[in-house]
Image: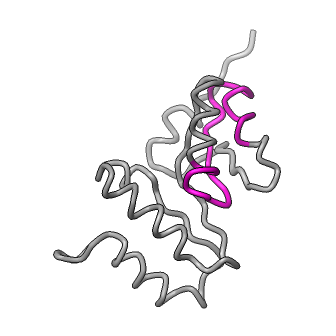
Amino acid sequence: MPKNVGVFEFNKAIIEATSDLVCAYKPNLAFYEALGNEGLDALKQTVKYVPDDIPVIADAKRGDIGNTAKAYARAIFDNFDFDATTVNPYLGFDSVEPFIQYQDKGVFILCRTSNTGAVDFQSLKCETE
């Protein structure tokens, strides 16, 4: 991001330059969270600025126990008003269920990822007895 340009202003310029070319936007929440309240405010403004006919997906990869998952789902869908999110199902169905309860929202469940380290676990061979 260029120096002396606010996060929202940077995102706004990208949206204005690309909104006729994209099928969705997928901001990665970690980068906004790392900026504290300023980043979260910029994220909220960004989601609101995207035209209504373009879905905004929270690249959050959330996955936690029931009550924590409920809080994450509320934050993503109620507070930030994302159209969809990514979730990590490793902890089981109860870590995903709070997200799929939002029937008007989308949920992308990680199953096989493309990051370099994914092979460390996703390609392990399991021996059978």
- Look at the picture and state if 26 lies above or below 62: below
- Nearer to me, 99 or 79: 79
Spot occupied by residue 54 in the image (x, y as percentages of width and height): 66, 76
**Chosen colour scheme:** one colour
32 versus 117 height, above or below: below
Direction from residue 74 to residue 101 in the image, left or right? right
Report the quarter where the N terminus lies.
bottom left
Q: Residue 107 placed where, x, y %?
A: 71, 50
**Per the image, is 94 magenta?**
yes
Q: Residue furthest top?
A: 129
Q: Is residue 57 magenta?
A: no
First to last magenta residue range: 76-99
Which quadrant of the rendered structure holds the C terminus? top right
Q: Is residue 31 above or below residue 123?
A: below
Q: Going by the image, does 39 lie left or right of 19?
A: left
**Residue 118: percent from the left, percent from the top?**
51, 41
Q: How many marks?
A: 0
Counting from the top left corner in percent of width and height, residue 5 is at: 24, 77
Residue at the limit of the structure toward the left, as seen here: 3
Q: What residue is drawn where x is 40% and y is 75%?
A: 11
Residue at image position (59%, 36%) is: 122
In this rendering, the answer to whether 72 lies above or below 19 is: above
